Amino acid sequence: MDTISVIGGNQLNGSIPISGAKNCALKLMCAALLTDGTLSLENNPNSLRDINSQVELLEYLGCAIKRENSSMTINASNIKAYTAPYDIVRKMRGSILVLGPLLTRFGQAKVSLPGGCAIGGRPIDMHIKALEEMGATIKLSEGYINATAPIGGLIGAKILFPKVSVGATENLMMAATLANGQTVLSNAAKEPEIIDLGECLIKMGAKISGLGTDTIRIEGVKHLSGTTHSVVPDRIEAGTYIIAAGMCGGTLRLENARIEHLSAALGLLSQSGIEVEQEGNDIIVHRDIGRLQGVDIMTEPYPGFPTDLQAQFMAMLTLCEGAGMVTETIFENRFMHVPELCRMGADISVQGNSAIVRGVNKLRGAEVMATDLRASVALVLAGLVAEGETIVSRIYHLERGYEDIVGKLGNVGANISRVSGRLQL
Ligand code: EPZ
């Protein structure tokens, strides 16, 4: 199994191109199921493992997909199956987003329950309940969601989500585009990735208003067409590299990244001592050597501090002046990076869904194990500033969500390399 080796101590200087957002691309790909036209995506993070899994699923359903560099075309005019099988869904939860599109366009869908993952149980009860409110009949059996729409198609409904859910908002927004009548999604999620998905659907002919607010209205239409759409930049990738620069010192230009998508995070980073600015389409982050200040963070739905930056921010806090408290409110088990960071010399104590991080003078390189996508990148960040070598194993977690992280960090001065075939103890 391959590992990543990082020798700490280098500053980071230069430019990093930011890829299209994984958590948008995966849903845009599902939106292709809503039309017999061709959906062309630009700035798509085509090399990610999760994208490969989604391609595998969509091709299994009958989609014709072509990829070249960061472009992808998807045509769903010849769908021959309505089942998303367990052995594909279990690899990547984003496949649950085929449920709404299949159900609203074809009147049926059989999708494996995605099951939990390392960070939590990840239920989809809100997806199911909301589709039932639109008239769907849904039976759960043998680990599958068996869904059928009423004869005339799904029926527009007023849906109030009890919790803010990115996936449920996206699944229902797509389902509502071809339903009969108006659907209102209240307590909807407001992430930039949802706005981008909605803007693409509008280009395909959907009638959607309220994107970016907690109330999204969709007027059902009979037919959607193909279109061309450029995927919104990945704010979590950008935030990760901003934190990396803050930890290592130096100046980074993050190409094609949008500062307004990270406002809550940047406010806290500024309190800790990391300043960033937008220059044209790029984000510039500069950090002189010197200790960062400890700050408290609490993850919240957008526009609050993103849970997907929590592990990375905690890695930064390990060397701060003073202490910082990290409270995770979105997922029930998103502190698995803590024991690994402690093995590198961090001083972190967890109480329930909060962790107190007390700054130490240095981290020591160690062999550490990745457990989920964002925990694994937090270990790479820690390795960039630790004394000696850090070896991160199970890097397939990283490859789900970060395009060419070794190349991108290596090009700006990090001493980082991929080591193939190192013995896994
Ligand atoms: C999306 O997951 C992202 N994944 C996650 O990113 C991200 O952390 C999360 O949104 C929150 O921003 C993708 O977009 C592929 P939710 P999603 O539905 O849609 C509960 C990463 O690292 N819930 O907003 O699954 C749920 O358990 C990943 O890139 C229900 O209870 O998240 C959680 O506590 C990790 N019932 C909360 O809501 C439901 O039916 C928010 O989950 C649905 C969700």
Image: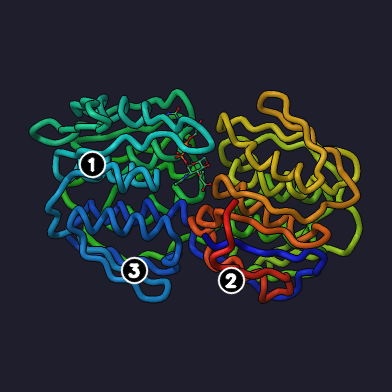
Q: Earlier in the sequence, mark 1 or mark 2?
A: 2
Foreground tag (1 vs 2): 2
Q: On residue 220, which mark appears?
A: 1
Q: Is residue 401 above or below residue 331?
A: below
| SS state under label 1 | loop
Q: Earlier in the sequence, mark 2 or mark 3?
A: 2
| Residue type highlighted by circle 3 | Met
Residue topped by disc 2: 17
| Identity of the residue drawn at 69% across and 32% down | 327
Q: Amino acid at mark 1?
A: Gly
Q: Which secondary structure, mark 2?
A: strand
Q: CA distance from mark 1 to mark 2?
A: 38 Å
- Asked whether 384 or 149 is in front, the reply is 384
Residue drawn at x 70%, y 74% as measured from the top left: 412
- Horizontal relation, residue 40 to residue 153: left or right: right
* Residue at x-position 27% and y-position 28%: 157
Provide the residue designation for mark 3.
72
Determine if residue 281 is in view. Answer: no
- The image position of residue 376, as x and y in percent, is 61, 51
Spatial CA span between label 3 and label 1: 27 Å
Label 3 Cα crowd, 10 Å radius (few <14 / some 14-19 / many 20+): some
Q: Are marks 3 and 1 in contact (CB under 8 Å)?
A: no
